[in-house]
Amino acid sequence: MFKKAKQSRVFQDIVEQIQDAIINGKLEPGAKLPAERELKDMFNTSRGTLREALRVLEQKGLIEIKLGVSGGAIIKHMDAEPIVESLALLIRSGEVSLKHLSEFRIKIEGSLVEIAASRATKEDIKELEILFNKAKGYYEKDDWGNFLKTDEKMHMYIGTMTRNPVFQFVQKSIHDNIHQYYEEYLPMNKKRTLENLTDFEKIIKAMKINDSQTASATIIDHVKRFNDKMQEKIKLNTK
C-alpha cells in the first residue's frame, strides 16, 4: 500500500501517502494501519519521524491512536469536528468576533434556510416540530440551558434539510460555538426565549407551504435583532 518515503521530505510524504489512502477509500473507517514496525519498514524511516507523522494525522482527525495490546492507529470517519474545534479556538481567542459571525450568518444563513425550505419534506418538518416542541417545553420550565441546546439542534437540523454537506458543516461550525456569546452578552430570559420561539414558529409555518422567501427573511431578521441586542450590551460594558 505504501512506498518508501522521499528522503528529502520524509515527514510530509508519510502524512500525504496515508492521507491519500484514506481519502481514496483504500483505508476505510475502522480499519487499522499496519503495526509501527511494519510502517517504519514500508516508509524506510525512523520511529520518531513516523510517530510525528501519525500525530499530525491524528490532529487532522483522520486517525485515532489507541494504546494497549489491541491498540494502534485506527482510521476515523471524516467529519467536521477538527474544523469546528479550530473555529471554537478562534472565537475564544477573539480572532473571530461576534460582528464577524453575525455578518457571515446574515449573508449565508438566509440562503441556507431558503434552500432548506424549498427542499423540506413532511418528515423534515415533523422532525423540526419535535425539536421546536422540546424547546417550548424548556421555555415553560425556565430551563434556559437546555433551551439553548435545543435551539442549536434546530439550527443544525435546518442545515441537514438542505441535503448539502457543506451547509451542514457551516451550521455545525457556527452553532457549536456561538452560544458562548449568548451567555456573555445576552443571557436567556422569558422574553428573549419567547422571541426566539416565535421566530422559529414563523420559519416552520413558512416551510409547511414552501414559502422559502418568508423563511429566509425571518432568519435574517432574527440574526440581526439578536446581534443588535448583543452589540448594545457590548457598548454598555465598554463605557
Image (tube, grey):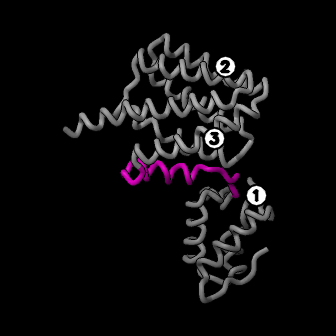
Looking at the rendered structure, the secondary structure element under dot 1 is loop
Q: Which residue is mark 3?
A: 111
Q: Residue at position x 63%, y 40% from top?
A: 111
The residue closer to the viewer here, 51 or 205, is 205
Above-or-below relation of 103 to 83:
above
Left or right, residue 50 beside residue 179:
right
The amino acid type, in three-letter code, at marker 2 is Lys
Quadrant (top left, top right, bottom left, bottom right) of the C terminus: top left
Q: Is residue 80 one of those drawn in magenta?
A: yes
- In this figure, which residue is indicated by the disc labeled 2? 205
Mark 3 secondary-structure assignment: helix
User: In the image, what residue occupies the spot 60% across and 74% down?
Assistant: 50
In the figure, is residue 187 to the left or right of 124?
A: left
Classify residue 51 by image quadrant. bottom right
Q: Secondary structure at mark 2?
A: helix
Residue bearing mark 1: 31
Q: What's under tag 3, amino acid-wise?
A: Ser
Q: Which residues are magenta?
A: 75-96
Is 6 situated above or below 155? below
Q: Dividing the picture into quarters, in which one does residue 144 lie? A: top left
Q: CA distance from mark 2 to mark 1?
A: 45 Å
